[in-house]
Image (cartoon, grey):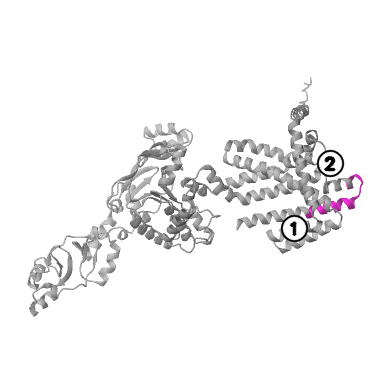
Amino acid sequence: MSDNRNVKIRVRNLSKVFGNQPKKALELRDQGLKRPEILDKTGQTLGLSNIDFDVHEGELLVIMGLSGSGKSTLIRCLNRLIEPTEGEIVIDGENIPDLKEKELLECRRRHFSMVFQNFALFPNRTVRQNAEFGLEVRGIDTATRRAAADKSLKQVGLDGWEDAYPNQLSGGMQQRVGLARALANDATVLLMDEAFSALDPLIRGDMQQELLALQHRMQKTTVFITHDLDEALTIGDRIVLLKDGEVVQIGTPEEILTKPANDYVRRFIEGVDKSRILTAESAMRKVRSTVRESDGPRTALRKMREHSLDSIYILDRERRLIGLIDADAASEALERGQESVTEAMTQDFRSVTREEPLHNLFAMFSENRFPIAVVDDNKVLQGVVVKGAVLDELAQAGED
Amino acid sequence: MAIEFPRIPLGDWIEGSLNWLTSEYSIVTRGISRVTQTGIDGLNDALMWLPDWSLLVIIVALCWWVANSRLAIGAALGLLLIWNLGLWDPMIETLTLVVIATLVAVVIALPVGITAALSERLYRIIMPILDFMQTMPAFVYLIPAIPFFGIGSVSAIFATVIFSMPPAIRFTTLGIRQVPVELVEAADAYGATRSQKLIKVQLPMSLPTVMAGINQTIMLALSMVVIAAMIGADGLGSEVWRAIQRLRPGDGFEAGIAVVILAMILDRVTQSLRKQRKT
């Protein structure tokens, strides 16, 4: 998740009417009429209505909705493949709906790369020539664009396929070419329109993971459209949930799951496998007690007794986790007359970060009986997860 | 009491405007006539200058190159038959007319087809005109050609161009309109200008369809230059025409078979060109 909260694209009041009397449709909308009534009265389709949201620098924002929700229209309004009827789309200080034709071309070249649902590769061009396309229309010289294309093809794992034609590749590989074409262009924003929806589930999962890794490495601002909630929850830093051309909820996957804005969202998330989305943080409890590395076995035993624990984590001076000692080991150490808990401690426990998906913790519990330690990047202990807490959290999320 | 409704003098109007065009634009028509005649003579002379056998070898080699050995062998046998029947020179004359008429038709048809594909308004104007051009009986074009360009090959070219051009326009328009929306969107999304979109995406994608249109144009041109013998075009058509006038069915069929052979060679060669493009 990105810490950088700079706004890259600001969308305000965005509306789109399909038809020849947009003004009339918007007037009715302002009187409180909904999409079906407006269609009945005027024959105009209200595609999008008063959409407000921000895309932050470096984040992966998912726009999610079922078919007819307006998500494809929305992403095409961003780069004006579809002309918005009213509203602002501001990117780096430029209001896109105001741009003249030439400025719009320039804006598309500088800011937007797009990946399409059905790949939209040019069948008469080789893989490399496809990847070069964005740079080619910008008039970049052959050597530079060839180097950029080859580099991005390598990033998506297609080195060696540069001279093949798209129809010689599998669906997953074709979409990698689509992705390489977008990356080679080095635009500031990546638009992905149902980019993985045409792929079979296994390939799709792989592509999602690769996109996440890429996103993590490059911190590219990405707007990703999908109709699949699981996909949205898996890859999104934040999610904009659309219904009938309106925003229903904006939030992180956890917010959507734990605080659904209304019944629609609640019904929507019913079928989700929550263990994949919830993280260790949600099941994490405060540590009741720890011992320091300088403490002896006697102190450890006393603390365990006081807090009714079977084992206790050992921290160094900076509260970094260095080991664990259980009651049996502490008693033996005491009998042997050992001075420090470090002499009897074990490393045979599991530690994770806050972001670890909950479902990964199940496997750890089956291999190891100790509570799982949650640490930050510096190994400082943040909390623990005990087996019961994971199940509690899942049961609770299921009731919502 | 019967109301007498006067006959609409449609024919008079058309004749009036044709006469007006002929007299007002005689400089233009004469200019076109001279240029076209020069082109016909030039190409004709060039093809005639080549020894018969070398032209035959060139055509057979072309068949082999664009298609396969089967077509090459077929073409060789067919051309030898034409040569044997003594129809080689008329065949060359017909070929010349077809080549020139097709060139002119394609040069006009491509830009018109492209604009019709890109502009909805032009599309609506051009399509009915094409319907008119295609359904009007071909012979009718021969009549105004004579006052414009006189008896002979230039008139034949004029009538042939008008008659054979519609499919090239139609297929060009169709080909460009058939380019998948997503590909056009992709070009737009990456900031391609109109001409970049046309040159890099729309034209290459529509090429097989455009080639199919050109193939149709060649076939129509061939059928028309034969008919154009009635207004004095040279070639295989005039052999047929002469056979009709002298009531000699044998000669007529010989020339007719030569036309069929030429048609098959032209058709197979252009079709293979199109298929090559696809892969």
Q: Is residue A389 in view?
A: yes
Please name the amino acid that badge 2 sits on: Gly
Left or right of B103 on screen, residue A72: left
Q: Quadrant of residue B2?
A: top right
Q: Which is nearer the eye, A356 or B188?
A: B188
Left or right of A97 on screen, residue A58: left
Q: Which residue is mark 2?
A: B232
The magenta region covers B243-261
Q: Which is nearer the eye, A229 or B252?
A: B252
Q: For mark 1, does the 10 Å Cα neighbourhood hold few (<14), some (14 to 19), or many (20 or more) residues? A: few
Q: For mark 2, does the 10 Å Cα neighbourhood hold few (<14), some (14 to 19), or many (20 or more) residues? A: some
- Predominant secondary structure in magenta? helix
Chain letter, disc 2 residue: B
Is residue B258 on the magenta stretch?
yes
Q: Quadrant of residue A272?
A: bottom left
Q: Is label 2 or label 1 in front?
A: 1
Q: Residue at x 56, y 54 (%)?
A: A124
Please name the amino acid that badge 1 sits on: Ile
Q: Position of residue A351 (x, y in %)?
A: 23, 66
Q: Position of residue B117 (x, y in %)?
A: 59, 42
Give the Cα separation between the discs numbered 2 and 1.
Answer: 29 Å
Q: Which residue is mark 1?
A: B58
